[in-house]
Image (tube, rainbow, N blue to C red):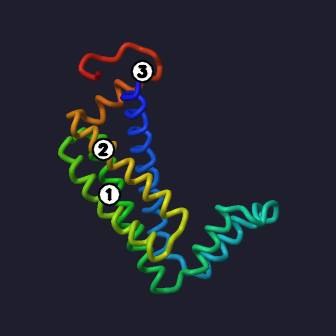
Amino acid sequence: MKERVLDLVFLIGVLFKGIDGLVELVGGVLLLFVAPAQLIGLAGSLTAAELAEDPHDLLANLLLNGVAHLGSGGKTFLAAYLLLHGVVKLAIVVALLIGSRRIYPWAMAALGLFLIFQIYEMFTQPSVGVAVLTVFDAVIIWLTWREWRRGRELRATWRGTVAWVFHRTPAPGTE
């Protein structure tokens, strides 16, 4: 049971990494082509209704605070970071979906480098968002290592876990 739950967490984590990578890629591209003033205006429009209802809304305030600090240099660095982070995450997820076990060590190394940067960020500019992302990435690295050590491809984990979730007999070789 514990193994199946960890498999499910791994699959959900890979899904979230893919979605996160796509959001970061889109965000990085937007930062390259949208002026900081436009981003501040867009963030204000997106959060106005929520802040009128709850002036202390965490996500709305984080968004407003985040775009308020974008200068030209900060914007370029953030765009490059988001583009790189997004491309790497999407490449890892695609490679895992294709079924290459060789990607596991590369995925762990790439996520480990981002993890080191996030730990540095937590010490220089602490934030709840970076702390949560750091813990999430550490768990994903551990679960990726677990899958790699077990010698399974993502497809096998997927088939066995889906069968377990829907209480079906798993296909041979997916246990």
Relative to 86, say whether 28 is above or below: below
Q: From the image, which quarter does the N terminus lie in?
A: top left
- Mark 3 and mark 2 lie on one chain; the one further toward the N terminus is 2
Q: From the image, which quarter does the C terminus lie in?
A: top left
Q: Amino acid at mark 1?
A: Leu
Q: Which residue is most to the left?
A: 102
Give the quadrant of residue 58. Answer: bottom right
Where is residue 139? Give x, y as percent: 39, 48
Q: Which residue is most to the bottom?
A: 72
User: Residue 164 bears which disc, if any?
Assistant: 3
Asked if labels 2 and 1 touch by Cβ distance under 8 angstroms, the answer is yes
Q: Amino acid at mark 2?
A: Thr
**Tag 1, which secondary structure?**
helix
Asked if labels 2 and 3 touch by Cβ distance under 8 angstroms, the answer is no
| Mark 2 crowd level (few <14, some 14–19, many ≥20, 10 Å Cα) | many
How far is the residue under mark 1 from the one under mark 2?
A: 10 Å
Residue underneath mark 2: 144
Name the residue located 33 percent from the left edge and 49 percent from the top edge: 141
Asked if labels 1 and 3 touch by Cβ distance under 8 angstroms, the answer is no
How far is the residue under mark 3 from the one under mark 1?
A: 29 Å
Residue underneath mark 1: 111
- Mark 3 and mark 1 lie on one chain; the one further toward the N terminus is 1
| Mark 3 crowd level (few <14, some 14–19, many ≥20, 10 Å Cα) | some
**Tag 3, which secondary structure?**
helix
Q: Is residue 45 left or right of residue 4?
A: right
Relative to 29, say whether 11 is above or below: above
